[in-house]
Image: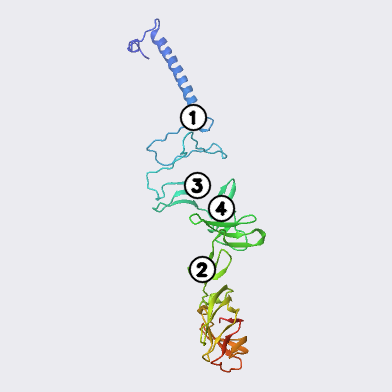
């Protein structure tokens, strides 16, 4: 028990009577009240902290030590709980930051369930600047607006625009889905050219330019077929590539004209010859007669484009040949790989080297191959 001497050492007043017993009891009572208030305050503090972390408070500030090792888990009190990050008056809501360089698998937001990682957003395991959004599961990845799927990347790599799954009988790499008219548009803002491809409602499909521009169809990065803005179909630069087997086997449609010149006479009169090509067939039309005074037994028309020359001899009857003022049926010979049309009589008689000679108006059709 304390004595009066050591109690009085701090210069505290000594009560009269039995000072040792009474002073000690009073001191114990003071200490007891202090500890009761201290425990009550600690309990109140713990209650307030618990209340804050169960989100009954308006805000919570958690300061973690700078030398923290390991991980920090913030757990919701129930399985239906959630963790919310919310700030007022600033643009950056949350920041993920490490001291490691990006691209080393150190800076990403990851998603787990009790079986392990399901996906992540951030920088992967390679030291590059590639930002990745990764679904590590064998399932699709969807992109939504207005709570509606707009684009879906399927587990196999197919991309569906406008829906959540592949439709139709095929399994394309890319598919555009839509109700009614569905099409894609490619627009060149510099030249104001728009290309469309898609469905035209119940009437079918379409492909082409929505602006006043031609369409070129190419193979091996070479233009072969041209459709002008007016709807005229020609091969590139108006020529026919008869050496290309693929082109000859298709129903290519082309038209044109050339100037035909009569030879084998004292003069060389000319006339216009129109031509049409559909696939492997060519039709020539000379709408007017081509006559002159003969001075040899030969007679030809030159000027036909080489692209219209057949690969083998074509012999075609025409209704009128003028030979020394005599009108008889005749023949046009189109030699192989030649752009010269030769005139002959059907009776194989030689033409006369005098008098009027030439071709009457004709329309003939022959094969290129």
- Relative image position of residue 198 (x, y in whole percent): 60, 59
Mark-to-mark CA distance, 2 and 3: 48 Å
Looking at the picture, tell me which residue is in the foreground, 360 or 348: 360
* Location of mark 1 (residue): 49
Mark-to-mark CA distance, 2 and 4: 31 Å
Marks 2,3: beta carbons within 8 A:
no
- Relative image position of residue 130 (x, y in whole percent): 43, 52
Does label 3 or label 4 sit earlier along the sequence?
Answer: 3
The nearer-to-camera label among 1 and 2 is 2
Which label is found at residue 111?
3
Mark-to-mark CA distance, 1 and 2: 73 Å
| Residue in view at x 49 percent, y 52 percent | 134
Marks 1,3: beta carbons within 8 A:
no
Q: Residue furthest right?
A: 202
- Relative image position of residue 73 (x, y in whole percent): 47, 39
* Location of mark 4 (residue): 151
Does label 2 or label 3 sit earlier along the sequence?
Answer: 3
Does label 1 or label 3 sit earlier along the sequence?
Answer: 1
Tell me where residue 282 sits by quadrant: bottom right
């Amino acid at each position: 028990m304390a004595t009066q001497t050591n109690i009085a050492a701090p210069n505290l007043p000594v009560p009269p009577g039995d000072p040792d017993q009474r002073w000690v009891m009073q001191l114990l009572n003071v200490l007891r009240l202090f500890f009761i208030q201290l425990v009550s305050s600690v309990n109140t503090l713990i209650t307030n902290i618990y209340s804050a972390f169960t989100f009954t408070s308006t805000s919570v500030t958690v300061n973690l030590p700078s030398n923290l090792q390991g991980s920090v888990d913030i757990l919701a009190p129930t399985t239906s709980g959630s963790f919310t990050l919310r700030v007022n008056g600033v643009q950056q809501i949350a920041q993920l930051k490490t001291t490691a360089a990006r691209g080393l698998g150190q800076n990403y937001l990851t998603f787990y369930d009790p079986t392990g990682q399901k996906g992540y957003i951030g920088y992967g395991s390679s030291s590059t600047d590639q930002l990745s959004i990764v679904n590590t599961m064998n399932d699709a990845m969807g992109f939504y607006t207005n709570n509606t799927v707009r684009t879906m990347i399927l587990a196999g790599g197919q991309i569906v625009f406008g829906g959540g799954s592949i439709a139709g009988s095929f399994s394309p790499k890319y598919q555009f889905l839509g109700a009614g008219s569905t099409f894609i548009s490619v627009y060149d803002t510099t030249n104001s050219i728009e290309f469309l491809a898609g469905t035209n409602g119940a009437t079918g499909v379409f492909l082409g330019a929505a602006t006043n521009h031609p369409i070129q169809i190419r193979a091996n990065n070479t233009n072969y077929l041209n459709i002008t803005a007016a709807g005229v179909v020609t091969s590139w630069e108006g020529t026919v590539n008869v050496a290309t087997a693929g082109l000859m086997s298709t129903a290519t449609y082309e038209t044109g004209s050339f100037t035909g010149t009569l030879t084998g006479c004292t003069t060389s009169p000319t006339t216009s010859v129109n031509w049409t090509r559909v696939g492997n067939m060519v039709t020539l039309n000379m709408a007017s007669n081509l006559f002159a005074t003969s001075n040899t037994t030969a007679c030809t028309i030159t000027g036909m484009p080489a692209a219209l020359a057949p690969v083998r001899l074509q012999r075609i009857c025409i209704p009128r040949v003028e030979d020394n003022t005599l009108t008889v049926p005749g023949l046009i010979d189109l030699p192989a790989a030649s752009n010269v049309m030769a005139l002959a009589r059907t009776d194989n008689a030689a033409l006369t080297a005098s008098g009027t000679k030439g071709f009457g108006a004709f329309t003939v059709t022959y094969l290129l191959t």
